[in-house]
Image (cartoon, rainbow, N blue to C red):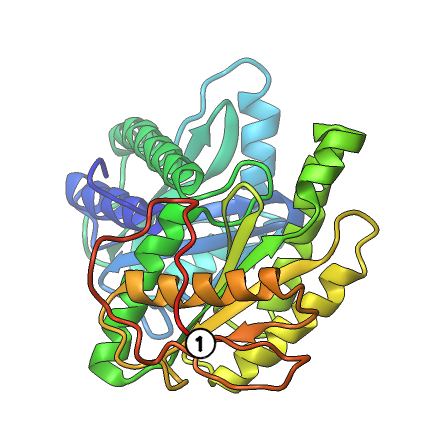
């Protein structure tokens, strides 16, 4: 569990470990989704029955079918006791109203003889359950097994909590704190991956760089709180426009610079989204619109061998848009009329040191 990078991987490790430790043939870890009133299975391991999947798409059970999840934890544990596991068998009670009616039916249906169910508790609250089963003909679980399962569930809870903390740390490392968008680190990583796809599969990679106009004026005249509101509002507009192209990454590069990174979409579609972004940004009551530059491997910009080159192309196009006070996007490699300024850089070299952050380089039109 300590090596897991995702909660599902952590849950799988917990299920495998518990299955081996308890001598089971099958194990599962489920999470209690209170807001939906259901127990959702994260992972199944071991001998899977018909219809069971290791990572089920949507295997869930209404909590009212398993009232012990609510009743056992909240009536017995919340009263001052400790969470503890319990055992059920295929030969147990199965009349309507019995706590284990559904579990007993499931054991019989899947050819299993007994199971032990252990609550997983995180931060003092019931998080879900660890479930381990044995086949028919194998020794049924005993009280000692249930006590051991309680300990294993506590170990699993510690591992899941650690994985969640690491996942949150990773999220924060790749997220802009003010807007909630991705940050420059996330863009660099995704862009490198995107260009790998471009080289291997020919996928079109497009980068849109946006410079929010008027932020300094807002900060100077209305205060930094108003400037932060402008950044947040533009971030929401950027996210909305990015959603038009599924899978597009919306990010804040820093200060008043933002970007959209689209992979696998035609360049014309990206340009249309850029135009929509300019329109929406111009309608914000704060700020003075946005300068947008677009560079895409789907346009005649020459070979794009590095993330730096695509950044330089998009950044130079954005600079040209700002210089010309363009109402729409400037697109690298495309020509237009007087009201549609362009940057033409298909012959720009892909050599020399990268421009320091904040420094603009001029390319010939």
Q: Is residue 17 left or right of residue 270?
A: left
- Front residue of 97/250: it is 250
* Quadrant including the N terminus: top left
| Quadrant of the image occupied by residue 14 | top left
| Quadrant of the image occupied by residue 146 | top left
Q: Is residue 3 left or right of residue 156?
A: left
| Quadrant of the image occupied by residue 328 | bottom right
Q: Give coordinates of residue 49: x percent, y percent.
A: 31, 69
- Front residue of 297/168: it is 297
How packed mark 1 is, by other alpha carbons closer than 10 Å (few <14, some 14-19, many 20 or more), is some
Q: Is residue 355 left or right of residue 229?
A: left
Q: Residue at x 39, y 55 (%)?
A: 187
Q: Which residue is mark 1?
A: 365
Please say whether residue 58 is visible from this viewpoint. no
- Label 1: which secondary element: loop
Q: Residue at x 66, y 68 (%)?
A: 326
Q: Give coordinates of residue 263: x percent, y percent.
A: 41, 74
Residue that protrudes farthest toward the top in the picture: 80
Q: How many marks?
A: 1
Q: Is residue 319 above or below residue 157?
A: below
Please say whether residue 74 is visible from this viewpoint. yes
- Front residue of 246/85: it is 246
* Quadrant including the C terminus: bottom left
Q: Give coordinates of residue 121: x percent, y percent.
A: 45, 29
Q: Give coordinates of residue 308: x percent, y percent.
A: 29, 60
Q: Is residue 316 above or below residue 104?
A: below
């Amino acid at each position: 569990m300590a090596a897991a990078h995702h909660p599902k991987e952590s849950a799988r490790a917990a299920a495998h470990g518990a299955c081996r430790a308890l001598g089971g043939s099958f194990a599962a870890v489920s999470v209690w989704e209170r807001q939906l009133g259901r127990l959702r299975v994260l992972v199944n391991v071991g001998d899977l029955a018909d219809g069971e999947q290791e990572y089920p798409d949507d295997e869930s059970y209404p909590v009212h079918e398993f009232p012990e999840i609510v009743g056992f934890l909240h009536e017995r544990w919340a009263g001052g006791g400790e969470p503890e596991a319990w055992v059920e068998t295929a030969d147990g009670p199965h009349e309507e109203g019995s706590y284990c009616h559904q579990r007993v039916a499931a054991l019989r249906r899947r050819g299993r003889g007994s199971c032990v169910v252990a609550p997983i508790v995180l931060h003092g609250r019931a998080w879900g359950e660890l479930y381990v089963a044995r086949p028919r003909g194998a020794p049924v679980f005993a009280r000692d097994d249930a006590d051991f399962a309680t300990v294993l569930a506590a170990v699993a809870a510690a591992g899941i909590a650690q994985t969640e903390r690491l996942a949150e740390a990773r999220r924060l490392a790749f997220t802009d704190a003010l807007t909630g968008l991705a940050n420059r680190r996330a863009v660099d990583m995704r862009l490198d991956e995107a260009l790998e796809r471009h080289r291997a599969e020919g996928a079109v990679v497009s980068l849109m760089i946006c410079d929010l106009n008027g932020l300094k004026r807002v900060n100077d005249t209305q205060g930094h709180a108003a400037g932060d509101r402008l950044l947040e509002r533009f971030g929401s507009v950027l996210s909305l426009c990015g959603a038009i192209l599924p899978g597009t990454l919306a990010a804040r590069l820093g200060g008043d610079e933002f970007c959209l990174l689209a992979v696998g979409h035609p360049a014309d579609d990206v340009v249309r989204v850029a135009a929509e972004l300019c329109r929406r940004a111009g309608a914000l009551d704060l700020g003075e619109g946005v300068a947008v530059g677009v560079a895409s491997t789907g346009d005649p910009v020459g070979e794009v061998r590095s993330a730096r080159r695509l950044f330089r192309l998009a950044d130079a196009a954005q600079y040209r848009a700002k210089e010309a006070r363009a109402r729409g996007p400037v697109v690298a490699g495309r020509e237009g009329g007087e009201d549609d300024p362009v940057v033409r850089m298909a012959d720009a070299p892909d050599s020399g040191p990268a421009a320091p952050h904040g420094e603009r380089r001029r390319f010939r039109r």
